[in-house]
Amino acid sequence: MKKIRIIAMLFIATLVLVSCQNEDTLDTETVSKEKYPEIAAKLQKMYFSAEGLEIIDLELPDGTKQKMFEVEGDMVFSKEHIEKAKVFTDVKQYRAYTIVTVPWWVGVRTLKIMGYTGGVFALSNKEKTALRWAVNNYNVLNLRIKFDLSFGTNLVSQDIVVYRRPNMTGVGGQSGFPSNGDPYKWISIWGLSPFSYNYNECVITHHIGHTIGVQHTYSTVSCGGSTPILRGVHIPGTPWGTDLNSIYNPCCPLGTTGELSHYDKIALNYLY
């Protein structure tokens, strides 16, 4: 595993684990940072924005739901693991343990990623093609992780599942961050079919990045009225300021090519 140097940040390998949460732990209505001040304060220490903090029912393709905090519009976290997350406050060198673990004796770790094809949660043909392109964006980099793509309905044996949420309005996607050395399992998307193949590719590539530990870039780009925030961990070789071409900016522009930027590739090669 390459050593991860935490300095001041473009991409952050997020220091949060994501898990299921009992429904009676969290209120069901939209929340504010004033209602959960300790959660909001912890998120801000981890260089996340606490504006627009919400609690959602994350609907999974097996019909179950998980109560989760929604952060910055497209990332989800459990209350328990936000509370337990470690926060690094200095600049010494160390490994960020929330990226995907690749044992040294393995060399390259293969992650199984599946496009879901069952019922109302099934991906459209356009979304399937975009998923293929998104997976290729990572596999061509020859990282220490690679993705083995399939399509089907067997949720048990998969590391990552990409599915469509039928009950959502608008356009978007949602995912989480690695825990215990494994990628976050669920990538949900909605409202993408009217948009171009490249736009679909951008959204899915963006969220695959989250599942393996890539945070939003520092950006002047604003999405849906959200306020861009200054990130805290800089990866060597990437800009200190805005990379308008980054696929990890908070939102995908309509004219996107769906491809990783030059600095996105540098960051991924540094992490893996």
Image (tube, helix red, strand yellow):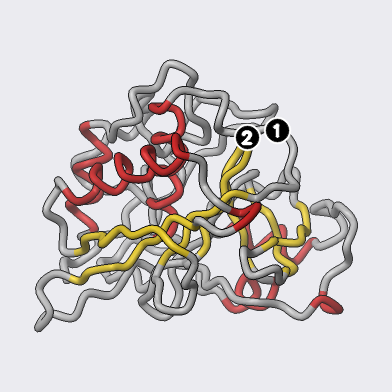
Q: Count the numbered circles shown.
A: 2
Measured along the vertical axis of the image, is residue 21 above or below residue 231? below
Measured along the vertical axis of the image, is residue 57 above or below residue 225? below
> In the image, residue 109 lies at what x, y percent?
20, 71
> In the image, residue 60 lies at what x, y percent?
64, 64
Task: Give amino acid for label 1.
Answer: Gly
Q: Secondary structure at mark 2?
A: loop
User: What residue do we see at 27% from left, 31% from top?
Assistant: 261
Q: Is any part of residue 73 visible from this angle? A: yes
User: What residue do we see at 73% from left, 68% from top?
Assistant: 65
> In the image, residue 115 lies at what x, y percent?
43, 55
Dots 2, 1 in contact, CB < 8 A: yes
Residue annotated with mark 1: 170
Q: Is residue 110 left or right of residue 233?
A: left
Mark 1 surroundings within 10 Å by alpha-carbon count, few (fewer than 14), some (14 through 19), many (20 or more): few
User: What residue do we see at 71% from left, 77% from top?
Assistant: 21
Point out the image quarter for the N terminus.
Answer: bottom left
In this orientation, which residue lies closer to the viewer: 259 or 238? 259
Spatial CA span between label 2 and label 1 = 6 Å
Point out the image quarter for the C terminus.
Answer: bottom left
Q: Secondary structure at mark 1?
A: loop
Residue annotated with mark 2: 191
Task: Give amino acid for label 2.
Answer: Gly
